[in-house]
Amino acid sequence: MMAHMKPSSGAHVGANNSVSHIMWQVMLALSPATAFGLLCFGWPALNLFVITVLSAVAFEAFCLRLKGRAAKPVIMDGSAVLTGWLLAMTLPPWAPWWIGVVGSGLAIILGKQVYGGLGQNLFNPAMLARVALLISFPIEMTTWANVSPLFFSHSPGLVESWHITFSGLDNIDAGTGATTLGFIKTEFSQNRLLTDILKDYSGFLSFVGWSRGSLGETSTLLLGLGGIWLIRRNIIQWQIPASLLLTVALLAGFFHAVDSEHYAGPLLHLNSGALMCVAFFIATDYVTSPNTPTGQLVFGAGCGLLIFVIRTWGAYPEGAGFAVLLMNSATPLIDHYIKPRIYGRDRKGKPLEIPKS
Amino acid sequence: MLSFFKKPRFRGGVHAEEHKTATAALPIADNFPLPKKLYIPLQQHVGKPAEPLIMVGEKVLKGQLLAYSQGLISAPVHAPSSGVIVDVNDYPAPHPSALPIRMIVLETDGKDEWVKTQTVDDPFQLNPEEISLRVGAAGIVGLGGATFPTAVKLNMGRENHVDTLIINGSECEPYLCCDDRLMQERAVEIIDGVRLMLHGMTNSSGTNLHLPEGGRAGQPGMKTERAVVAIEDNKPQAYLAMLAAAEPYPTVSVIQIPTRYPMGWDRQLIGYVTGKEVPVGCRSSEVGVTIHNVGTAYAVHKAIRYGQPLLGRVVTVAGGAVKRPMNVEVPFGTLISELFEFCEVDKAQTARIIMGGPMMGDSLPHVGLPTVKATSGILALTQSELKNTDEQPCIRCASCVSVCPAGLRPLDMANNIRINQLDAAVDLGLKDCISCGCCSYICPSNIPLVQYFKYASGEVVARQQAQHKSEQTKRLIDARNARMERIARQQREDELVRIAAKAERERLKAEQEALV
């Protein structure tokens, strides 16, 4: 007879996936857009990115220490790196170092660990941190650097980048400007019309990502490709991105058709701000989104609706962060009301009737 | 296009790595040496255990009845070979607990001498009732793993109006391929068994013993019109063999179904083949469908044509630690250790022994356990084949929700069970869980979800029993208190009567004395 073994229930075999595998795949999907963002905004952006990710990991380790748990295995699951990474992507590329550190602290401590760590949080940590930063430090969070690629003569060099990151921009107006959405919002308040406002706008450049914006959110193309790859790899499902983008496009299309001088068109909406990043990488966060396909459709549509409403009528030019947080808070409700029908029961949980024939 | 919309959908499920190639190409081995001793459990089926009718020391022949079935849902047990009964006692059961259950120990004499069997020339002339009687007497139970007595199912088929008999040849569990080989090698016999089952389900008298409310009554002369043999499309050889064997019979059709676990779940298959959904708490016959396994059909063929009871079965022995993986025909009661010796299992490499498939099978604590009617496979898996058990927090990825064929939300159920909210888990559908293992299989955090659900189901029953017991105790105590009170009251009243009588007596006495 062989030695006694611990009894265990099926399944005895398993699919070849793990939490860290999922996290690294998401990071892989993010990397083209991130690399492009770093290229566009140069050394200061790289500084900010590294600081944000490292501090996220440091805060995670600190919290685990406080809990008396071994930090290394938890950090190796990659969730803290991913949170820091996503946060860095949504920050203005030339933001000072402390924005990254404070943001990571907010994301990891307030956004995740106070709830009990991975899988327990109600709100998306990166979005929570971004919104908190935006409300607390509006100047730093809305100072958008011009596109100034690495190794170009006008772009800041390595030494200058440290200066920008650690002691701030000397002359704010020289190297910065407004994002497309921000520009439209301020010009609308001057009673200008859309065709006039968008004289210099190039849809193609902003599709590629050659425009002012958050560190990793400018390239619609690369974010979209990364997102579609994730769907193909079955890491995320299509429901949330599709319903989110479709809702924004339909709403924008409708209002643009009604009044094309006061409402931006669907392509401009899809092409700007945080929309692609949010649709594929933020709203699809497992922890804070519903867990049924129908619930995910509702969630995505809700996010899209809120984004459009805030962008069009709200005080902020971009509302993706607020929209996601609001829908995050609705997730438990959605999961409560939208659930799969159990086999042999009706939607209310009563056994089915035997069909008469 | 229309057919695309009409096609019933498959819900949930996973596609696990099959691991069938090592064994599916080899013919069923029939050269397994007859074991010296067979340990035959009296309970190898759902229902009441069989009752032994032999004595220790008695000589028995192969196929002789050892224990008769008790009650409506039960099955008899026969001698898998000739020899002497040496013991009827408790031995470890082929179950994760290996707790002792009653077994008959048969010491074989090596002659394999048959008892006189009853054959018929044309079984289709037999009464349908006679068919199920013989099937029941042969100890045939569902060989797909459920081990429900087949005769009971045939009876239910007669008593309800069943229009479709589905023969389950999906064999969706990884590693297992005993049904695949059986279909490849014995297709004609299986199809014959299917036709006999169809005949056995014909209602000739119009009795409706178990007719549920709302069910459709079987009428005299009502027949089950068609049998559908459903085979997963990863078994093309078996499909072709069965197709050829079924060709002469218009009532029996053979179809291919997609390869996806758990296709072999009866309700999934019923949904796929007929589009019908079986309501919770109902038997499939109530919606007009009965489902049997291919192995069961083969056993029916042998029982009716040759009068041979169910004495053994084809078992898949596979897994990374098995040097000679194969399908082998063994008599019931063969110890797994002997089977492993025959297939050259490397003990040092064996990390887990599993009876059944790797998705739903049970892990066994050791190899000193017998094979039974439910044993479709014995796996010896190495550590690298097993699922990683390093449990991580749930990230709510909802993979478990999307793979659940029953439409449950395993993550929410597990979260409630973790905090001991078993009632909440029951409300979420704990009792509708079929333990198919898809959620555990897919979970990236390696959470043993099925383990949670099995634990919770057991715990719910235990709590109900405990509650029932405490209520019962309370009732008994209340009754006792009431009784004691009544007795005390009675005594008090008797006492009062006695005192009154005494006073009366004394008064009378005093009066008499006064008169005197």
Image (tube, grey):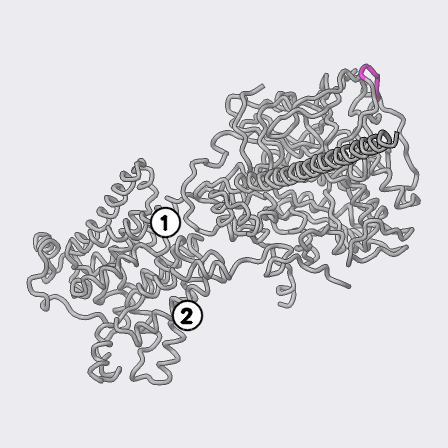
Q: Is residue B483 left or right of residue A112?
A: right
Q: Is residue B325 left or right of residue A30?
A: right
Choose the circle earlier in sequence order: 2 or 1.
Answer: 1
* Mark 2: amino acid: Leu
Helix, strand or loop for the magenta stretch, by majority: loop
* Mark 1: amino acid: Gln
Q: Is residue B472 above or below residue A160?
A: above
Q: Could you tell me which residue is drawn at 55 percent across and 48 percent down?
A: B423
Percent x, y of residue B513: 85, 29
What label sits on residue A246 in the rendered view? Answer: 2
Q: Nearer the viewer, residue B152 or A14?
A: B152
Chain assignment, label 2: A
Q: Could you tell me which residue is drawn at 34 percent across and 69 percent down?
A: A307
Look at the image and say whether residue B277 sits in the magenta stretch: no
Look at the image and say whether residue B58 sits in the magenta stretch: yes
Specify start and end residues of the magenta stretch as a single range.
B56-61
Q: Secondary structure at mark 1?
A: helix
Q: Which residue in the rendered view is the most extreme toward the left?
A: A170
Percent x, y of residue B159: 83, 51
